[in-house]
């Protein structure tokens, strides 16, 4: 009864205040949609029933310009700018990486593997969410060229009756989803989570807001969202890509461009401008890095530049 009253208060507040600022929206979300619950879940890999703590709600921040909520794989399949050959190779690459990761770690189930691929830019059928309102706000602002944004609120308890919810936070070997307090949603039946049926099934609520210049500077946290410094998964993915393309003589330019646009974690070579006692003192970034620079070549480039700097 208390929850229903809180939701009723939330709806009344929105009617009185049809457009909040981002700061006001975050405060309201914390007030109305905080707390944890204890759920009886089924381990998607072992099939065992387990008791698991979970947030009562998860969140997803988006630009108001988006009219659909599709998985990255569905967006890839519907991308009219890519040839079918390019789409097939990108999917083959994602399947290869998933297979490699699971062969190296037998405890890594298919949903956790998909969570890793999703957070590092590869196409999957899952949808990102987070238990952290501030992270959702950062995603709503990031790369948003408009003055408006939205945060979607999903009831975890209701989602569990209609879809698979994956907690990605225990993956300490993959730091990005942990830093983002990442969760993932997988609905076998509906591809667009803005369809009226999953919207109702998930207890979805949408809070729209305006974004001021100050709020944009405060919450546009690309560096935080995509930070991979010292991330062991980054090194593993670099090596997998290197091995995958080592024997390929003809590189698909469509795949090349897609990787460049979507792999935010790719290693960035540094040019050493000056050095002292064998250590760089001034460096500069090499812009427009080609994603086909392999991991080993990147290391060799840094070594070569350091030698030249001396």
Image (cartoon, helix red, strand yellow):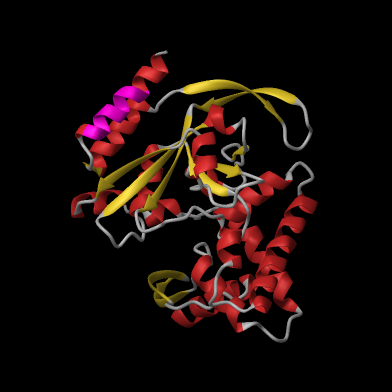
Q: Which residues are magenta?
A: 7-15
Residue at point 48%, 33% (across, down) = 203
Residue at point 33%, 59% (across, down) = 144
Does residue 19 lie above or below 32 as drawn? below
Chief SS of the magenta region: helix
Residue 76 horizontal/vertical position (percent): 58, 66
Does residue 177 lie above or below 250 as drawn? above
Q: Is residue 233 visible?
A: yes
Residue 35 in the figure: left or right of residue 46: left
Image quadrant in which you'd find residue 292: bottom right
The image quadrant where one finds the N terminus is top left
Residue situated in front as seen by the camera: 254 or 225 = 254
The answer to whether residue 241 is magenta is: no
Q: How many marks?
A: 0
- Farthest front residue in view: 196
Residue 137 horizontal/vertical position (percent): 35, 45
């Amino acid at each position: 009864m208390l929850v229903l009253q809180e939701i009723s208060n939330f709806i009344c507040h929105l009617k009185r205040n049809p457009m909040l600022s981002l700061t006001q929206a975050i405060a309201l979300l914390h007030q109305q949609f905080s707390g944890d619950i204890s759920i009886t879940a089924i381990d998607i890999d072992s099939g065992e029933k387990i008791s698991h703590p979970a947030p009562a709600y998860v969140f997803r921040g988006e630009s108001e310009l988006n009219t659909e909520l599709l998985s990255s794989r569905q967006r890839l399949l519907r991308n009219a700018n890519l040839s079918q050959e390019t789409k097939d190779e990108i999917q083959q690459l994602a399947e290869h990486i998933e297979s490699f990761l699971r062969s190296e770690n037998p405890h890594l189930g298919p949903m956790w593997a998909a969570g890793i691929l999703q957070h590092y830019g590869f196409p999957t059928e899952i949808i990102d969410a987070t238990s952290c309102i501030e992270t959702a706000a950062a995603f709503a602002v990031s790369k948003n060229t408009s003055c408006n944004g939205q945060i979607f609120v999903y009831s975890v308890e209701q989602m569990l009756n209609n879809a698979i919810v994956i907690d990605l936070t225990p993956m300490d070997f993959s730091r990005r989803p942990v830093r983002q307090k990442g969760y993932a949603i997988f609905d076998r039946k509906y591809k667009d989570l803005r369809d009226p049926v999953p919207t109702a099934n998930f207890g979805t609520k949408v809070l729209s807001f305006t974004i001021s210049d100050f709020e944009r500077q405060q919450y546009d946290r690309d560096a935080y969202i995509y930070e991979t410094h010292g991330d062991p998964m980054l090194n593993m993915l670099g090596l997998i890509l290197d091995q995958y393309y080592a024997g390929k003589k003809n590189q698909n330019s469509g795949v090349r461009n897609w990787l460049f646009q979507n792999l935010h974690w790719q290693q960035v070579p540094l040019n050493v401008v000056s050095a002292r006692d064998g250590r760089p003192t001034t460096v500069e970034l090499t812009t427009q890095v080609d994603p086909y620079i392999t991991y080993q070549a990147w290391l060799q480039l840094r070594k070569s530049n350091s030698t030249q700097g001396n």
